[in-house]
Image (spheres, helix red, strand yellow):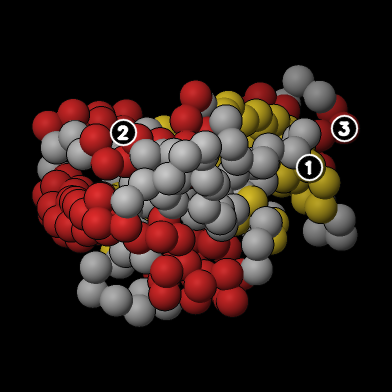
């Protein structure tokens, strides 16, 4: 079930709600319900505990994206998911049917979310349960937002300044035509998704800057890429 325990996002943020997949053979109802209860209990316990670990980072200096990733990895290493997660006949829809139904009704299945910043802004402004949380960590050059959902999924979004407006302007002085243009800071946005077991599903990033001359705006630099990790193999990742 490791691959099925995510309703979160992939690619250019594809919200993927996964239906149950049934393997050959049957599982007795009693055993199945015990596994569902065990998984639900684990998620209901791990979510607030992880939130507290991430909240503690807000009181530390110079927290980087790498530090956030390490905190998440360490948490799940010290609090591993139960074996019940490995049952291929179960999904989040079995464990949290009402919550998954609500997500499906709101977003639809496989509906693309093309703006990861808008996704995080929505979550920051519409937290509906106390066990949903967006933790915001700021320093001089970056802002990191970590969304932990009530279903145990995690989405990390960092917006970091790679180079300042002044640095971009100095670079452009070698190009006479560019002297008439003003340049924005170069920003890098990185998004990382984890499933309810703490397995990294994907990493995507985009970096760029703009220039403007008072009349028009043009892209100055632009780059980006994504990586789908092992546990993200069932998620849809369209070409960039």
Q: Is residue 157 left or right of residue 60?
A: right
- Element type at marker 1? strand
Q: Is residue 229 in sight in this rendering?
A: yes
Which residue is identified by label 2? 69
Residue 162 horizontal/vertical position (percent):
51, 33
First reached walking from the N terminus: tag 3 or tag 1: 3
Neighbour tally class for label 3: few under 14, some 14-19, many 20 plus, Cα within 10 Å: few
Q: Is residue 143 above or below residue 229?
A: below
Mark 3 or mark 2, earlier in chain: 2
Q: Which residue is label 1 attached to?
A: 219
Q: Decide: marks 3, 1 in contact (CB < 8 A)? A: no
Does residue 179 lie above or below 105 as drawn? Answer: above
**What residue does disc 3 label?**
177
Residue at the image point whose x is 56% and y is 55% from the top? 19
> Where is residue 236, by image quadrant?
top right
Q: Earlier in the sequence, mark 2 or mark 1?
A: 2
Residue 11 location, x and y as percent?
64, 41
Quadrant of the frame with the C terminus: top right
């Amino acid at each position: 079930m490791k691959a099925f325990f995510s309703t979160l996002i992939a690619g250019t943020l594809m919200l993927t709600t996964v239906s149950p997949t049934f393997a050959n053979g049957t599982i007795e109802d009693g055993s199945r319900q015990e596994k569902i209860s065990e998984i639900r209990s684990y998620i209901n316990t791990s979510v607030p505990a992880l939130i507290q670990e991430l909240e503690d980072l807000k009181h530390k200096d110079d927290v980087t994206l790498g530090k956030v990733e390490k905190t998440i990895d360490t948490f799940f290493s010290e609090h591993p998911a139960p074996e019940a997660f490995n049952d291929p006949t179960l999904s989040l829809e079995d464990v949290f049917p009402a919550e998954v139904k609500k997500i499906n009704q709101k977003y639809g299945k496989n509906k693309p979310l093309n703006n990861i910043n808008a996704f995080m802004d929505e979550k920051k402004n519409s937290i509906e349960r106390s066990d949903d949380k967006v933790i915001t960590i700021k320093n001089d050059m970056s802002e990191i937002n970590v969304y932990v959902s009530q279903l145990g999924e995690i989405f990390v979004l960092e917006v970091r300044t790679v180079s300042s407006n002044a640095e971009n302007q100095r670079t452009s002085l070698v190009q006479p035509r560019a002297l008439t243009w003003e340049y924005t800071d170069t920003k890098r946005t990185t998004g990382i998704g984890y499933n309810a077991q703490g397995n990294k599903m994907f990493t995507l990033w985009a970096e760029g800057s703009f220039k403007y001359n008072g009349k028009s705006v043009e892209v100055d630099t632009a780059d980006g890429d994504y990586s789908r990790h092992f546990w993200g193999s069932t998620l849809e990742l369209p070409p960039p």
